[in-house]
Image (tube, grey):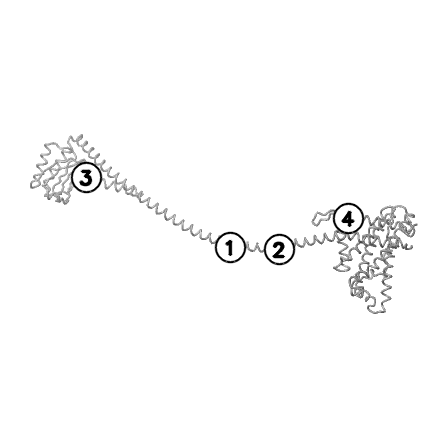
Amino acid sequence: MEISPDTKIIWSWGFVNLNLTIIFTWAIMVMIVLTAWLATRKLVVHPPLSRWQNIFEAIVTIMRNHIREIIGPDISRYMPFVGTLYLFIAVSNLLIVVPEYRPPTGSLSTTAALALCVFFAVPIYSIAAQGVGGYLKHYIKPSPIMLPMHIMGDLTRTLTLAVRLFGSIMSESMIAGALLAIIPFFLPVVMKLFGLLIGQIQAYIFAVLASIYIASAASSDRSHKHEEIPMAYRGGSHVHGK
Amino acid sequence: MKIDLFTLFAQIVNFLILMLLLKRYLYRPIIRTMDERERRIGASLEEAERKESEAQREAAVCHAERQEIEDKRGEMLSMAQAAAETWRRDLIQQAREEVEERQLHWRQAIEREKESFLRDLRQRAGAQVYEIARRALADLATIELERHIIDTFLARLPGLEKPGADAFQTPGMEATATADRQGETQRREAVICTAFAIDKKTRERIEKAVRERLAGDFDLRFEESPDLICGIELRAGGQAAAWSLRDYLETLDEKMSLAFAIKTEE
């Protein structure tokens, strides 16, 4: 059984290996961007709105409200990053209903790439918000003794992000495959539906955690922000999913 | 479960490209549209609030003006009612006066007609009575009424001491004394007035009796007057002695007037 779509190489040229993960990622990207372009091509301010404009406005509004609840009122700079994370993961996990489709989020390379994006986005947004000094200062708060802990926290946080998403999606695929071998009827359908739900929850969790990390780093009072974050959302403290 | 570095790098690039594309084609236009809509809705709400406050202000002004108009209307209505009442009273008074004036004219007309009728009735009644009496005397007693009247007059004439004496007050006889200044300055004249023609013999008898009764020199003249109806009258020196049906007719006139007056009152 293939665990990761990375192993299915479509085209290879030296170091460059086009596997299913990249192919499906491109397909997802094309689908999302094309749909967004078609929907926003003829935007109107006053009703009646087109069906696709309504859908995308609803999606964007919901994402903005969630990000605003976590980060604060000024979310314009965070919206593309967090929103794209959610949309990409959600659409990737939603397409598992398509036969022969392998979600890119079931590849550790993809989840690690997204986790690395979050890993680098946190300091970038933090430096943009409070400068390099302000960002580095939080590593020695409340005491310089906490410096290793902060560094370790950042690394484990990124690791958990990657592994959590990968584990959830990969295990769901594996369970579905195993059940398909044991009980070929009915139960795999239920598990597929269950996998759809899990995939959407994981997309939500990934985006929310990224928002929390960015918000906590961008805030000047880092320790206070940490206290406000629910324990379940803290990187390294808990592993979500199965 | 291993990480392919090329895939890792490629996915990072893919994600960044996707983020930029979505920012370009999704977030920015959608958010801009929603912000524009929000701004327009806000502007519309502000405009609506401004118009509402303006409308409330206008409504307050209109209410005040309407109240003022209502007050003025009530005041004008009261004035109009008072004027109408005064006019009505004037009209009633005017109509009443007009009715009273018409009633007065009507009563006067009735009175005139009544008097005219009575006068005419008296004339006709006297004439009829005279005619009936004359015919009755002529037909039943074979005696002419005129001759009897003249005889009676001549028989009573000596009984008069002088004109204006009490003897003239006998029934059917009347003496009237009136000043006749012209008579004093002209030659004395006596006039025998009858309602009928007198033959020559009778005239001589009358002239003789009159000259015996009236002393002095005077002219005697005979006249016929239909107004006298029936009888004979002697006028001399502003005085007159008559033997006629006038007294009876006057009595009839009075009774008829009284009867008409009672009917008019009813």
Same chain for labels 2 and 1? Say yes or no: yes
Graded by Cα atoms within 10 Å as few (under 14), some (14 to 19) or many (20 or more), the crowding at tag 2 reads few
The earlier-in-sequence mark between 1 and 3 is 1
Q: Quadrant of residue A112?
A: bottom right
Q: Nearer the viewer, mark 3 or mark 2?
A: 2
| Residue in front for this viewpoint, B178 or A178 | A178
Same chain for labels 3 and 2? Say yes or no: yes
- Expressed as whole percent of the image width and height from the top left, the position of residue B265 reads 30, 44
Q: Nearer the viewer, mark 4 or mark 1?
A: 4
Label 3 sits on residue:
B246
Label 4 sits on residue:
A37
> In what quadrant of the picture does the N terminus of chain B appear?
bottom right
Cα distance in 3D space between marks 4 and 2: 39 Å
Query: Which chain is home to disc 3?
Result: B
Cα distance in 3D space between marks 2 and 1: 27 Å
Query: Which chain is home to disc 1?
Result: B
Q: Quadrant of residue B253?
A: top left
The earlier-in-sequence mark between 2 and 1 is 2
Three-letter amino acid code of the residue under disc 4: Trp
Three-letter amino acid code of the residue under disc 2: Arg
Q: Nearer the viewer, mark 4 or mark 2?
A: 4
Query: Which chain is home to disc 2?
Result: B
Same chain for labels 4 and 2? Say yes or no: no
Three-letter amino acid code of the residue under disc 3: Arg
Cα distance in 3D space between marks 3 and 2: 111 Å
